[in-house]
Amino acid sequence: MSAIIIGTIQDITERKRAEESLVKAFEKERELNDLKSRFILVASHEIRTPLAVILSSSSLLEVASERMTAEQQLRHLSKIRQGVREMAQLLEDVLTYSKADAGQTQIQPEDIHLKALCQEVIAEIAATTGKAHSLSFSCADQVDLVISDKNLLRSILDNLLSNAVKYSPPGSEVSLDLSVKSAQVVCSVTDHGIGIPDRDLEHLFEPFQRGKNVGATGGTGLGLAITKRAIDLLGGTIEVSSQLGAGTTFTLTLPLQLEVQP
């Protein structure tokens, strides 16, 4: 008499999917908690410093303005304005990144004279943070009109050039090179500054990440994260090469014509 084996087959596909979804949810929550912790750490430092300057200068103006010269009063007022600008910029960066991360950034393609835009941004940097540096611009090809988002492009160029100036010694050169290759715009920003450690390159475009060698130089670690999000929205790529103590080059590649997904 042959034995009869009775068994049951259970489809565990749905259970596996549920387990995978749960694991992903836990990972996402852990990433968000880590992001919050880094934001609190950076924000508390970046807000505390300008606040201290504002309080110090305003207190001095309150108790000793009559004994100050007009030049001294203006100097303290300038410090107060600068402190307010720094805090406002921090809030603006956080809002900009949050909107991009949530997919709320509105893309508005238009005809852009890219060469003229590059020259405008360089002039703005030179008039503010770049006075102590040599800012150069070269355009190897006839780059005329491109179709892209002007605000996003301006933000990308401003962030890359501002960083290049910030992390370079006074008197050094910062260059912006523009060309067209295979129907794409190639834009390179090169500095001769402190460079980026190899261990930091992997996390360079993550929010609130800063190089271990920045020292006392201020910053939120949001600029490059915002830049990467903007480049993704424009359908481009960005690469970085760096050598400690010798400088860094960011190479941005963008389509000549932005294709907006419906």
Image (cartoon, helix red, strand yellow):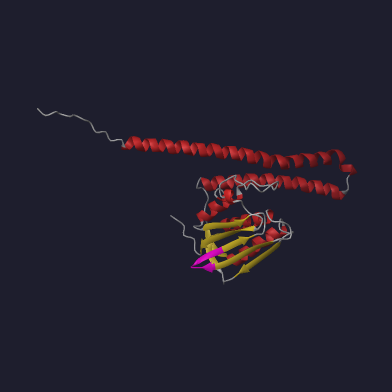
Residue occupying image coordinates x 71% and y 58%: 130
Q: Nearer the viewer, residue 206 or 51?
A: 206
Q: Nearer the viewer, residue 198 or 124?
A: 198
Please tell me whether residue 133 belongs to the stretch shown in magenta: no
Please tell me whether the stretch drawn in magenta is mainly helix, strand or loop: strand
The residue lying furthest to the bottom in this view is 142
The quadrant holding residue 11 is top left
**Which of the image's four quarters has the C terminus?**
bottom left
Mark count: 0
Residue 254: x, y in percent?
52, 61
Vertical relation: 225 (above or below) 126: above
Residue occupying image coordinates x 83% and y 39%: 62
Please state if 162 lies on the left or on the right of 8 as rendered: right
Residue 149: x, y in percent?
54, 58
Segment colored magenta: 180-186
The quadrant holding residue 193 is bottom right
Please state if 36 lies on the left or on the right of 3 as rendered: right
Q: Nearer the viewer, residue 203 or 82?
A: 203
Residue 40: x, y in percent?
62, 38
The residue lying furthest to the left in this view is 1
Residue occupying image coordinates x 83% and y 40%: 60
Q: Nearer the viewer, residue 68 or 7?
A: 7
Please state if 218 lies on the left or on the right of 140 as rendered: right
The residue lying furthest to the front in this view is 1
Residue 58: x, y in percent?
79, 41
